[in-house]
Structures are given as C-alpha cells and as structure tokens.
Amino acid sequence: MDILLPVLVGVLVAYVLIYTTLFKGGKFRGNPTLKGKTAVVTGSNTGIGKATALDLAKRGARVILACRNKEKAEAAVFDIRKESGNMEVLFMRLDLASLQSVRDFAETFLKTEPRLDLLINNAGKFRDMTMCLIASGKTEDGFGMAFGVNHLGHFLLTLLLLDRLKQSESSRVVNVSALLHRLGSLDFNLLNTTKDLVTGHSSWHAFRAYCHSKLCNVLFTRELANRLEGTNVTCYSLHPGVISTEIGRNMGLLQKVLFVPMSKLFFLNPEEGSQTTLYCALQEGLEPLSGRYFSSCALQDVSALGRDDALARKLWEVSERLCGLS
C-alpha cells in the first residue's frame, strides 16, 4: 500500500505530460465577428467540421454546410441554428467522391451566393482512427477513395470557387491535412496507370493512401499560395490533432473495450479539434504565412516532401488534367 500511492501519482503525472505535450491542442483565442461574411465548410455534418461551422455561425457568418448526406446535414443545420441563434446556416449537397457533384455544387453556389470569404476544406475520408480497418474503395470517377475525396475533390472545388473568393476584400482557403502527411509520398506513374497512389485494398493500403492524400493537401496548399501571391486570397494547411470522433464505429467489441477508453483519455473532442482550423481561418496577421502548415494553433514544419515546390507544381498539373481542367 505504501508503494501504491507513489505509483499512482507517477502514472497520473506521466498521463498529464503525455496528454499536454503530444495530444492536447492549442486554443484559438481571437474574437472576430463575421457578420456579413460567408463560409463554406465541407464535411460539416459531424465531428470537427460541425464544430467549426458552429463556431463560425456563433460569430455571425452565413455558413454553408457542404455535405454528402442530406439527412445528417439537415440535422446538423437544425442543431447549429438552435445553438448559435443564427438562421443563416444552410445545407448544399456536395459529394467529393464525384467530380460532377463538385461541379454541380459550385454552379449552384455561384448562382445563389454573391460572396465567399472562407472556404474550409475539412472533409476527409478515414480521418478517424478506424481508418486502418476500412478498404480504400473507388470514387465515382474511378480514383482511389482517399486520393479522390481528400485531395482531388477539394482541388476542383477550390479552383471553381476561386474567382468568388477573389471578389472579397480578404478571403482564405483552409485545407485540413494531418500529421500523417509525414508518412506520405507520391508516385505519379502509379497514379497515371491506376488512378490511385496505392496498389492494394488491405487495411495497410488504406492507411498508406490516407497518408499520401494528406501530403497532397500540404503540397496543394503550398502551390496554391504561390499562384495566389499578390491577390487578396491566402491559404493554409493544418493538423487538427488526434480526434475521437465516432472512434468505435467500425470496431469489434474487443477493439472497442481496449481502444475507446484510451481515446477518451487522450484524444481531442470535436470542439478542441476545430481550434487550429479556426486559427487558420480567423487569426489576424497570418497573411505573410500563406501556404504554410499549422498545428496546435502554431506554425509547424512539414516533411521534406511537403516543402518540395517542384513536386507541388507537378501535383497541380496532374490534378488539373485529372479534373479535366487542362
């Protein structure tokens, strides 16, 4: 018993140190108002996307929830309107696994919305920790699901809305990437032949595909910033933290028993996970850092491949071709 108390204290101290240094994210402490401004948030019917949309709505923005699932998105609209008191929250259907759906969304938006101040490319296939358990699959256009949804759909969406962003006095594009971009790489020969960045369909391949797609987010942001230099539009990529959103959705009973309690102890909830997104979208004075990568509401370094301008240009050119823009 004499030894038990020091051991428990030691475990508690270790937990606090690990949590605060590795998992606990920063907090956005700015208080800008967004009355009269419009934001689009993809994948905002749940998780950090919904938390981001709620925060923007509370600040007075007109918020478009760009989501695939109509039922879930309309439920999120109801929740956000009720909690924020802002009735200018609405749903527009967007399926990033279909390039035609992206084009349809952009066409509808440009016809009905006179301005766009914030484009937050938040939706991500396999972002939760069950990603290793899910096969990669294919998009409507035959691309690998992670590459097609996480990168290519957002690439096309951004380019189609870019002129509207340029019409605002100061606008931003925020691309939600991940720390796992550091494990990513790009094989353009494989992409050209298979329309994917991996060759198999195992859980390991799904994990690798996710890492590759998150590197694409970082490179896209870098090249976008280069092409937007001298305009009123800036862009940023970020790691939101490790989020416990729907953590046990695809797990078996034993996995849930082992994993879910750990996730509740260590991982961020959606509100905490949205803080770096909000920082990149709203923090004053970030314009000189356009194209850079953030985590825990602070500037961070990216992998060596994430700093490769030639690779970023090549990805842009290939993405244009794959989307039928060149």
Image: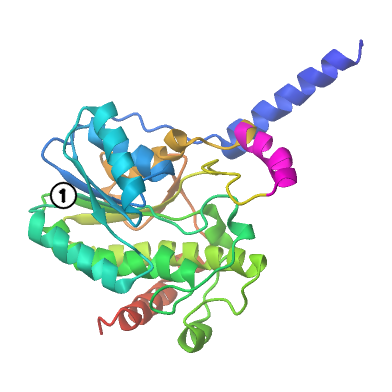
Q: Is residue 186 magenta?
A: no
At 40% across and 40% down in the image, what residue appears? 274
Whether residue 54 sits left or right of residue 186 in the image: it is: left
Q: Is residue 80 above or below residue 177?
A: above
Image quadrant where residue 206 sits: bottom right
Provide residue 50's location: percent of width, then percent of height.
Answer: 36, 41
The answer to whether any part of residue 186 appears in the image is yes
Q: Which quadrant is home to the C terminus?
A: bottom left
The percent coordinates of residue 16 (x first, y second) are: 65, 26
Q: Quadrant of residue 83?
A: top left
What secondary structure predominates along the stretch shown in magenta? helix
> Which residue occupies the foreground of this view, 6 or 155?
155
Q: Is residue 257 magenta?
A: yes
Q: Residue at x 48, y 62 (%)?
A: 214
Mark 1: secondary structure? loop
In depth, the one of 172 and 78 nearer the eye is 78
Residue visible at 34% across and 67% down? Answer: 153
Q: Which residues are magenta?
A: 252-264
- The residue nearer to you, when weighing 209 against 43, is 43
Left or right: residue 149 versus residue 266 is left
Q: In the rendered image of this protein, does residue 280 appear above or below residue 27?
A: below
- The answer to whether 114 appears left or right of 203 in the picture is left
Q: Is residue 19 left or right of residue 56?
A: right
**Residue 296 position within the rendered picture, expressed as x and y whole percent measured from the top left:** 47, 40
Identify which residue, 144 or 26, lies in the foreground: 144
* Residue that badge 1 annotates: 170
Residue 35 position within the rendered picture, expressed as x and y whole percent measured from the top left: 13, 35
Picture residue at 43% right of the left edge, 51% below the top: 238
Asked whether residue 227 is in view, the answer is no
Location of residue 315 by image quarter: bottom left
Please name the amino acid that badge 1 sits on.
Answer: Ser
Give neighbour class at mark 1: few <14, some 14-19, many 20+ (Cα, 10 Å).
some
